[in-house]
Amino acid sequence: MSAGVVLDWLGAAALVAGALLSLAAGIGVLRFPDVLDRMHAATKPQVLGVLLLLVGLGLRLRTPTDLGMILLVGIFQLATAPVAAQMIGRAAYRSGRVDRDLLDVDELADRGR
């Protein structure tokens, strides 16, 4: 088997794994009961799913221009997802949509809203 065929198969496996993780993240956003669980589903498996999709695309396309664009998309995804999760969590906490009984440590309790 040639190296190109092996890279194509690895790319296909990464694409399928990324799609399944993104699907699981979407289902989690719809099905999880509270904001913090939904925030987790919207960030962690979704980011890993997108990164696996990008790796799969990179293994399939293999041109320098495409790889550069894929790298930029991956960096943007890694830079924005944590910030979005922080803002969602902060807004949920401030608006009182977080069940404080579920929190192990509430570092913001003494600061007020």
Image (tube, rainbow, N blue to C red):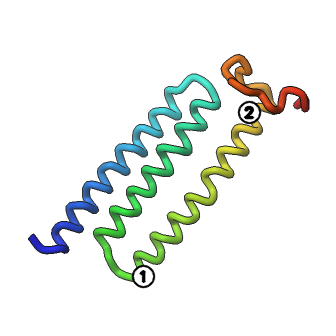
Residue in the image at 20% along x and 61% along y: 9
Residue 40 drawn above or below residue 50: above
Residue 108's image quarter? top right
- On the image, numbered disc 1 is attached to which residue? 65
Residue 78 position within the rendered picture, expressed as x and y whole percent measured from the top left: 57, 58
Find the distance from the CA under tag 2 to the CA under tag 1: 40 Å
SS under mark 2: helix
Q: Name which residue type carries label 2.
A: Ala
Residue at 28% x, 69% y is 60
On the image, numbered disc 2 is attached to which residue? 92
Q: Residue furthest right?
A: 111
Q: Residues within 10 Å of mark 2 (few under 14, many from 20)?
A: some
Image quarter where the N terminus lies is bottom left
Indicate the position of residue 100 as horizontal and vertical percent values.
74, 21
- Using a 10 Å C-alpha cutoff, classify the residue at mark 1 as few (fewer than 14 neighbours), some (14 to 19) or many (20 or more): few
Q: Is residue 24 left or right of residue 111?
A: left
